[in-house]
Image: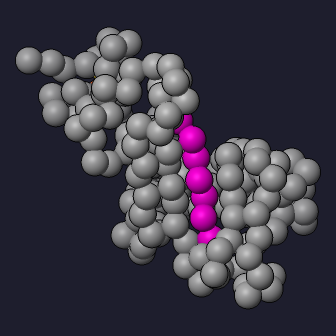
Amino acid sequence: MDITKDIEFAREKIFTRYLCSMKIGEQRIRLLLIGKADKVYRSKGRLFIEDIKTTFNPEKYSDKFEPYEDHKLQVLVYLNSLYTANGSFNSDDWFRISHKSKAWIIKIIDSNDDKIVRIFEAVHTKQAKKYLKTKIERFILLTLGKNEKQHHGSIRKCSSCRLFGMCEYRLEN
Ligand code: SF4
């Protein structure tokens, strides 16, 4: 709780609990996303989530200035979660980490030689929080079958998607 203290949790030793609720018609839906962050620390009052992604194909990051959307959503979920050191599902055991601001870092590591290929990072903003909320709401509606799945129809999005090689719905020139 003491925001003046820098802290760092041992690698992969902290679990995340993202709980949200949404009213759909007369129903209140609650969603819990559980995770395990690679690295969580607070430095000078700023809370950081750092995640490492490895790849055998580092070339695909050469013209990327933004992380893949699923990678970004993952760190945003972690950043907006409560935390538990023992993996408990009892919300009484979950805690907040006090902070003045938040940020995320995604490091891309080349699995062939363990060298860093790319580092994406950003300070958390109100817009990012809204972006996450919109995605979560869409996920809930799709899961409940309240929204039809729709293809975004963008070749550009597919070409920068990390699932491109294995996706049966990909669009290409
Ligand atoms: S490749 Fe598939 S998963 Fe990726 S953006 Fe295109 S349709 Fe979506």
Q: Nearer the viewer, residue 58 or 96?
A: 58
Which quadrant is home to the N terminus? bottom right
> Which span is picked out in magenta?
47-53
User: Does residue 50 show up magenta in the picture?
Assistant: yes
Which quadrant is home to the C terminus? top left
Q: Residue at x 31, y 27 (%)?
A: 60
Q: Residue at x 42, y 74 (%)?
A: 126
Q: Identify whether 143 is placed above or below 137.
A: above
Q: Identify whether 77 is placed above or below 3.
A: above
Coordinates of residue 39 in the picture (x, y in percent): 68, 52
Report the magenta stretch's main SS: strand
Coordinates of residue 129 in the picture (x, y in percent): 46, 66
Q: To which quarter of the image does residue 171 belong?
A: top left
Image position of 20 (left or right of 91): left
- Is residue 139 something one can see in this rendering? no
Q: Identify whether 145 is placed above or below 92.
A: above
Q: Residue at x 50, y 34 (%)?
A: 115
Image position of 114 (left or right of 149): right
Q: Nearer the viewer, residue 163 or 2?
A: 2
Q: Identify whether 36 is placed above or below 55.
A: below
User: Does residue 118 show up magenta in the picture?
Assistant: no
Image position of 122 (left or right of 20): left
Q: Residue at x 23, y 38 (%)?
A: 63
- Is residue 106 something one can see in this rendering? yes
Coordinates of residue 96 in the picture (x, y in percent): 75, 72
Residue placed furthest toward the left: 173
Coordinates of residue 110 in the picture (x, y in percent): 48, 28
